[in-house]
Image (cartoon, helix red, strand yellow):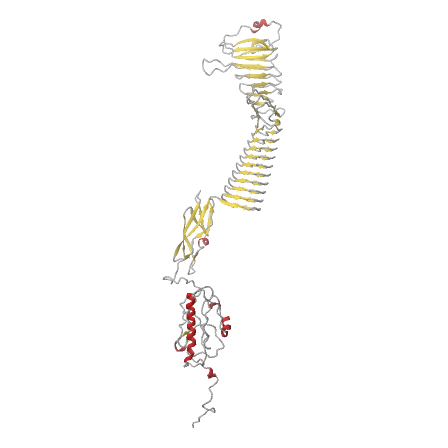
Amino acid sequence: MIIKVKGTRSGSAETAAAERYAAKASEGEGRAPYVFGAALVWLGLYLKSIFPTWGQEETALPPQKAAQGAAEPASTAFSAAAPPRAPEGAPSATGAQPAAPVEDGPAGLAAGSVAPPKTVHVETFGLPVPWQGAPFVPPGGAAANDNHIAAPGFANPGPKGQVLPPADDGPADPKPDEDDDDGAPPPQGGNRPPRVSGPVHLADMASCAVLAIGLGQLLRHAEDPDGDMLSVHHVTASAGTVIRIDGGWEYRPEPGFSGPVTLSYEIGDGHASVTQTAHFSVFERHFIQGTDGDDNLLGGACAEDIDGGDGDDNIDAGGGNDVVQGGRGHDHIVAADGNDTVFGGDGNDVIFGGRGDDHLWGGAGDDRIFGQEGDDIIQGEAGHDLLDGGTGDDYLDGGAGNDSLHGGAGDDLLIGGAGDDLLEGGAGNDILSDGQGADVLRGGLGDDHVVAALDAADDIYDGGAGVDTLDYSAAADSLLIDLHDELASGEEIGTDTIAGFERVLAGAGDDHVIAALDGGDGSLDGGEGWDRLDYSAAEECLLIDLNAGVASGVEIGTDAIAGFEAVSGGKGDDHFILGDAPFCLEGGEGDNVFEFLAPSPPPDPGATVEARSFEIMDFKVGDRLRMSKYDLFERIIDRHEDDFEKIYGDDFDDDDIRIRFSHERDEDIDRTVIEADFNRDDIYETTITLEGRHLLVIVEQGTA
């Protein structure tokens, strides 16, 4: 039995409500809107490529798309607007290369439906926007009233209406973050060589320094497109030497070299390599400039030129032969190692020379300058300065102002300059010169030389320990140099206090030098002029050998004497020995002996012996004149002077000297003149004048 079911509705019933909204694929009028939209997109892109400045402002979206446009992602900024979402249930995918636009519009659009026009969103950068084509509509059609719009994307049509992944989402496509801007395919084997974007510039260096170079510095402008680790090989220099060390390289310039240097090297990734260069310069000196403020400037191990400028600067020059200028302000300068030159400038500066032979200038102001080690030249210049040479043979010049100079160890030269200065030589054989002003000079240890200034000021000179010299040789007028009472006076020098000197140099005037009774050996030089050496303070016997230039005694030691024309003995029984040089003598108290040696033979045979004369100012009873083996002395007798020959006698040997006497009177002054012919050539070359009238007895030595 067959049961047939029939519907209750009539055949002419209305179509279901849902069917009224179904898209009809056979209706041709749904194709026109999509073709029109694609044409608009193409036209906009074409115009944009011709006029890139168009599109600076965004085109307003249609009202029905305003909400969708606000939600579009930033990645679509350089692209055309996203196409409508595919029908629900269809897979959605995006890709860089969309499929070609379809010619047939979607089926099932309701009559009178018009697709929204395609919108083009152009950024203001002026770049052409790539054409992405029309969206693909699956054959199943799209809902006529699709209120839920999917995220923008492009579909790749497959066979029989299947939706495939985008055409550019293949497994062999490069990752989005890979650097494939050049578009060149990798070489065979898959490795690309390293790349460099330009030469490397390293820091400049001083000629005496060593430059350390790290791996990162040489790889500064290098990269590997494959991400491989890079290495550096075969580093060479255009000048100097490059040495491989742990962690990098070390560059050493040749001694005395300065100029540009180029390093050449290779950068490799283990498979390929490229050539790279690094550049820097070697300079002879480095310049460091301060400001007008209070600067802290630090030099290096090489030579620098440092200018502190104004302000109270703190400067450490470091090693090398530096030149430092403190400028104005109260500067603190440490020259440190090297043979440095420092100019303190204006202000109360403190300067330390450090090791090396330094040249230090204080400038204006009350400066304190310490030479420290080395043979330094220090000049305080204007101001009340303190100069300390330290160790080494230093030169110190206080300049103007009341300065204090300390030579320290070494053979130093100290010059006080103008002002009331204090000069202390310290250890070593120093030379001290006071200059203008009332100065105090102390030689200290060593054999010092003190040069007195002709400033008419009352100075204090102390030689200290050692054999020290007091030098008045620059004086032209007469001086009284009393070593016994420790005073020196004269119109040019004022009245100086002197002590501790073993040697004295008088000036060009007629000077009077009184020897000290210090028991030490000394040296006395009268200089030019008619000078007197005075031992009158001596109580003990003296031997004054004027022929040998030596005076000795218990009280005076042994003095070397020169440049004197007159000598005074002491209170004892002194013995004077005279040679070729003429002298004026005062024996002083005691029974003195004046011994006259035979004259030196003439340099040319047959020439006449040069005449010589002597004068004894205080010859008296008890004194003797000794010539050859005979002594002449005065004896009080009652006989008439006509009996002189009887006193003299006539029993001399033929080879004895000839002696004759005479008396002279000149302006109420009586003189006794004794003449002698030592070589018996009938020329009496030796003349001895005694003040007063004397009757002499001549005897052979040892008989009276």
Res. 704 image quadrant: top right
Nearest the eye: 405 or 569? 405
Nearest the eye: 602 or 299? 299
Res. 692 image quadrant: top right
Q: Position of residue 31 (x, y in %)?
A: 41, 77
Question: Would residue 68 be found to the left or right of residue 556 on screen?
Answer: left
Q: Position of residue 429 (x, y in %)?
A: 55, 31
Question: Would residue 335 be found to the left or right of residue 110 on screen?
Answer: right
Nearest the eye: 190 or 98? 98
Res. 483 image quadrant: top right
| Picture quarter with the N terminus | bottom left
Q: In this view of the protein, can residue 134 be seen by the observer?
A: no
Q: Name, please, the residue furthest toward the left.
A: 188
Q: Position of residue 438 (x, y in %)?
A: 62, 31
> Is the residue 262 above or below the residue 389 in the image?
below
Please name the residue shown 45% across and 15% down the image: 604
> Is the residue 3 above or below the residue 464 in the image?
below
For the image, the number of numbered tags is: 0
Q: Position of residue 266 (x, y in %)?
A: 40, 53
Q: In this view of the protein, can residue 683 be seen by the observer?
A: yes
> Is the residue 609 above or below the residue 262 in the image?
above
